[in-house]
Image (tube, rainbow, N blue to C red):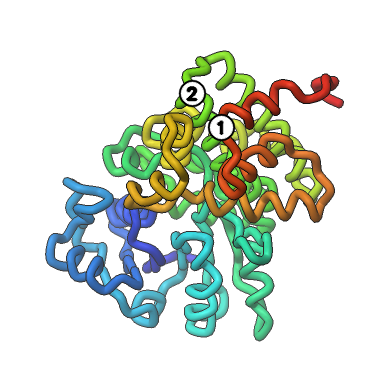
Amino acid sequence: MKIDKVAMIGAGSWGTALALVLARKNIRVALWDRDADHIANLVRDRENKRHQPDHPFPESLEVTDDLGAAVQGAGCVVMVVPSHGYRAVFRELWPQLSDGTLVVSAVKGIEVDSGMPSADLMDQENTARQPPHLCLLSGPGFAPEVPDRPPPAVPAACVDPEAAEQVQQLFAAEYFRVYAASDVKGLEISSAMKNVIAIGAGICDGLGYGLNTRAALITRGLAEIARMGVAMGAQPQTFAGLGGLGDLVLTCTGDLSRNRTVGLKLGSGLTLEEVLAQMTMVAEGVKTTRSCYHLARRLGVEMPILEQMYQVLYNGKRCEDAVRDLFQRGLKKENG
């Protein structure tokens, strides 16, 4: 099926970046956001000066705060709203979708109250009719870099291989490489949990602990992510791929990482409230720490880094004490 129009639901940094990828291929894109003032600025400026400055919108990119108009006639709907608002927006747009619409989630987070990744959430909300093709687009990609065209490589996952290939073809561009995948569960857990580990990596950097400590945290963080994912039915090999190791390394080491930035500031001595007050964009890892902490407890999965991040963020534990307690735990076998 040829897709003539895409509705991009969320006009933040990542939503705008993905909209530009498609619009530069002369695909018609409707970029939606709930914030009427933000949309008015986009209409006036024909660029997203807040999140993606100096990247003018192509003629094929339209902007609207009318959700019905955005999804009308769209063969593909891409969800790029923060995880804490995902359900409400999906519930509003779901009745307006045509049968056979391709729905792609590009969100890296887990709903706090339910502990559900976006695909499970959409399945739960879809009770009235045949489900659409639900896909996930994730992996290592900082939104500010994408419009400048340094090429990233990301996976697109769907249990339906034809739908995964359709998303792959839709987004693939000269400077945007996409791999088709099937492990939606593994990709979702990786994309959410890597933000939690990135906060921890930032804390270590903020405390001045150096590269050795960062490497240890990333590696053991990957082990925790894989442990949770496998417990939820994910494929182990997913965690060695772009959506697992690739996204984790990028988020834990890159200066553009919002979650690493949260950790850096916490490690430097600021409180979480002070850190969040300074930020203009959402760092998904803060809320995801809480949702994944409770999810791990329900699953009975041991996740010591996640445990310490939860104690730092929600119980006021000192960063130094959290790192000390991690490194002074009882000795283990690496693969035990």
Q: Is residue 203 above or below residue 184?
A: above
Query: Mark 1 or mark 2, which has the lower sequence index?
Result: 2
User: For residue 235, which numbered disc appears in the image?
Assistant: none
**x and y percent of residue 234 in the render?**
75, 46
Residue at x 53% of width, y 47% of height: 285
Q: Left or right of 302: which side holds 319? A: left
Residue at x 51% of width, y 30% of height: 203
- Which residue type carries mark 2? Leu
Query: Is 126 in front, or is 2?
Result: 126
Determine which residue is flagged by label 1: 319
**x and y percent of residue 136 in the render?**
57, 55
Q: CA distance from mark 1 to mark 2?
A: 8 Å
Determine which residue is flagged by label 2: 207
Question: Image quadrant of residue 46?
Answer: bottom left
**x and y percent of residue 187 in the render?**
63, 46
Tell me the crowding category of disc 1: few under 14, some 14 to 19, or many 20 or more residues within 10 angstroms, Cα based: many
Q: Disc 1 vs disc 2: Cβ atoms closer than 8 Å?
A: yes
Question: Image quadrant of residue 7?
Answer: bottom left
Q: Is residue 322 above or below residue 313?
A: above
Query: Is 27 in front, or is 255?
Result: 255
- Which residue type carries mark 1? Cys
Residue at x 46% of width, y 67% of height: 77
Residue at x 44% of width, y 60% of height: 80
Question: Image quadrant of residue 312?
Answer: top right
**x and y percent of residue 181 in the render?**
63, 46
Q: Secondary structure at mark 1?
A: helix
Query: Is 15 in front, or is 333?
Result: 333
Q: Secondary structure at mark 2?
A: loop
